[in-house]
Every structure is written in C-alpha cells, then in structure tokens.
Image (cartoon, rainbow, N blue to C red):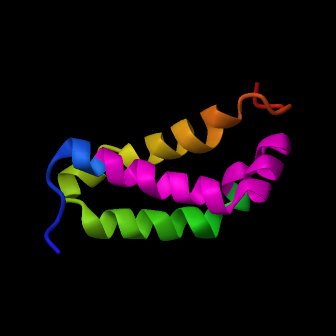
Amino acid sequence: MPLITIEEAARRLARAIASDLNLYNEEKIVRGIEKDSLFEELVEEIEEGRALYKSRVAEELYSRNLYDRALVDILVKSKGHLKSRLW
C-alpha cells in the first residue's frame, strides 16, 4: 500500500484511528479525564495507533502532528461535559 501524501487523507486517517480509540476505550477515557491521567490510561492504545499512522503516511505529514491533534479533538474535546481538573 503506498504512503499517504495528501494532508486531508492523512487527517482523515488520524481521525479514524482516534475515533476507534474513542469507541473501544470509553471507560478508560472517562477515567483518564476525570483523574487527569488520560494519556497514561491509554498509552498502549495511543502508541499502537501512532505506529499504524506513521506506517501509513509520508514523513513530512507525520511530522505535522495531525495524529496528536486528532487525539485531542476526539478524545478530549468530545468529553468536555465530564467533571475534570483539566477544566
């Protein structure tokens, strides 16, 4: 499979991976936000997703942190209704 070289396609892949993390790890995400330990709770899942993302996109796109932005948008912003020390 060829590497993704178009930014919009890389952004979509990052969001799809983050959405899967959100779908399959709801309990960990809620606990992580409530206890301000989200990235520690999901370290394995996030790194697995990061490895997949890195293997699929060109280096110049990987270095733009699109994956990390997708994680914040999907895992954090969508849970703004939860009680947390973060906000």
Quarter placement of the C terminus: top right
- Residue drawn at point x = 41 percent, y = 69 percent: 51
Quarter placement of the N terminus: bottom left
Give the overall secondary structure of the magenta segment: helix
Q: Looking at the picture, how far across and down is residue 63, in whole percent?
A: 29, 50
- Residue drawn at point x = 44 percent, y = 63 percent: 50
Farthest residue in the top direction? 87
Q: Looking at the picture, how far across and down is residue 9, in whole percent?
A: 24, 49
Q: What are the residue bounds of the magenta stretch?
A: 11-39
Does residue 6 appear to the left or right of 36 in the view shown?
left
- Residue drawn at point x = 53 percent, y = 36 percent: 73
Magenta stretch holds residue 17: yes
Does residue 13 appear to the left or right of 4 in the view shown?
right
Does residue 72 appear to the left or right of 36 in the view shown?
left
Does residue 3 appear to the left or right of 86 in the view shown?
left
Q: Looking at the picture, how far across and down is residue 42, in whole percent?
A: 67, 61
The tally of labels here is: 0
- Residue drawn at point x = 37 percent, y = 45 percent: 65
Magenta stretch holds residue 31: yes
Q: In this view, does 13 lie above or below 77?
A: below
Q: Looking at the picture, how far across and down is residue 56, in whole percent?
A: 27, 66
Snapshot quadrant of residue 66: top left
Farthest residue in the front direction? 23
